[in-house]
Image (cartoon, grey):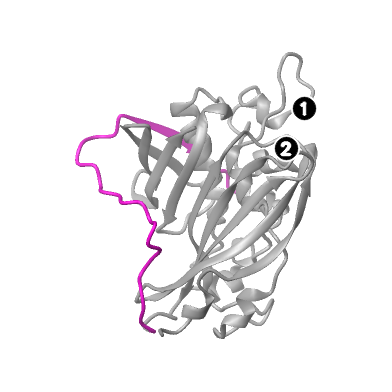
Amino acid sequence: MTRFAEFAGKEVGTGTFTWDSDRTLLYAIGVGAGVSDPLDELQFTTENTEGVRQEVIPTFMSQLSIRSNWLKELGFPARPWDGYPEGLVQGEQSVRLHRSIPAEGTADLKQVIVGIFDKGSGALIVSDTHATLADTGEPLGFSRTGLFVRGQGGFGGPRGPEDALSWEKQERAPDLTVSLPLPIGQALIFRLSGDRNPHGTDPAIAKKDGFERPIFFGLGTYGFACRALLKGLCDGDVERFGAMEGRFSQPVIPGEQLDTQIWLTEGGAQFQTLANGERVVIDRGIFRYR
């Protein structure tokens, strides 16, 4: 048995997550909705616009979480400010929805470890969080999170989940590109949705984590990419959104432009998000219509 094999399939938490209209509005602004044009994306940024029903950006699904200390039990060296593994960053993220997310509600959650994988330069910790609407019992969807612990690879075992989707880089030019500005102060807004990791705001912590300056949050970049996909593929209609996944490959610095390049495929699309059109920051992106 390889190290960490006993964690595969382990249920590490159950609980509920409740959100209201204010929280979903804050999330939308945190991922840039309405920033470049306050009259655009009003379905995500307002709850009282005449003739516009409030809707929720689908990647809000990644915010539904359970408080748990299981990451601290894996035995990695701990960072002093919260006890979680040192060098921990967001590595991968996917969400899948069975229906659109209500503007307010409560979900019953169950979190299961998929596995802990050896990526060579670090360890990839993958878990799934399944959500069911508490009032109706209706399945809402699930999110898969891949957390990367830098410098903790080399322990042996598989490199990734068996059910990972295949992805091949497209050789042709993208069918469309959606560009969105990332304001210089965006991290100060996004952190209010719950991610208080100081490498997004504290220069000293960012440098200790290996970055020259504070970076934007991975899940924030993921939300920007979702907005680009909604604009480019769904005409802003969340009912058409089925699933989205991607791998975080490079840090993003607030103030950069995020360019999401999209290649149409059967049933959806492949995508990459680039910072300033120069370096890939979300790689191996896959989108599926519902």
Magenta stretch: residue 45 in it? no
The magenta-colored residue range is 155-184
Q: Which residue is mark 1?
A: 47
Reading the image, the residue beneath label 2 is 25
Residue 22 seen in the current view: yes
Instruction: Judge left or right: residue 272 versus residue 245.
Output: left
In this view, 102 is above or below 234: below
Q: Is residue 17 left or right of residue 40?
A: right
Image marks 1 and 2: residues in contact by CB distance under 8 Å? yes
Give the percent coordinates (x, y) of residue 159.
Answer: 35, 70
Residue 177 is inside the magenta segment:
yes
Q: Is 25 located above or below residue 169 in the figure?
A: above
Taking the view exactly as shown, the residue that stands out farthest to the left is 171
Residue 36 % position (x, y): 58, 31
Amino acid, disc 1? Glu
Question: Exactly how many numbered labels are in the figure?
Answer: 2
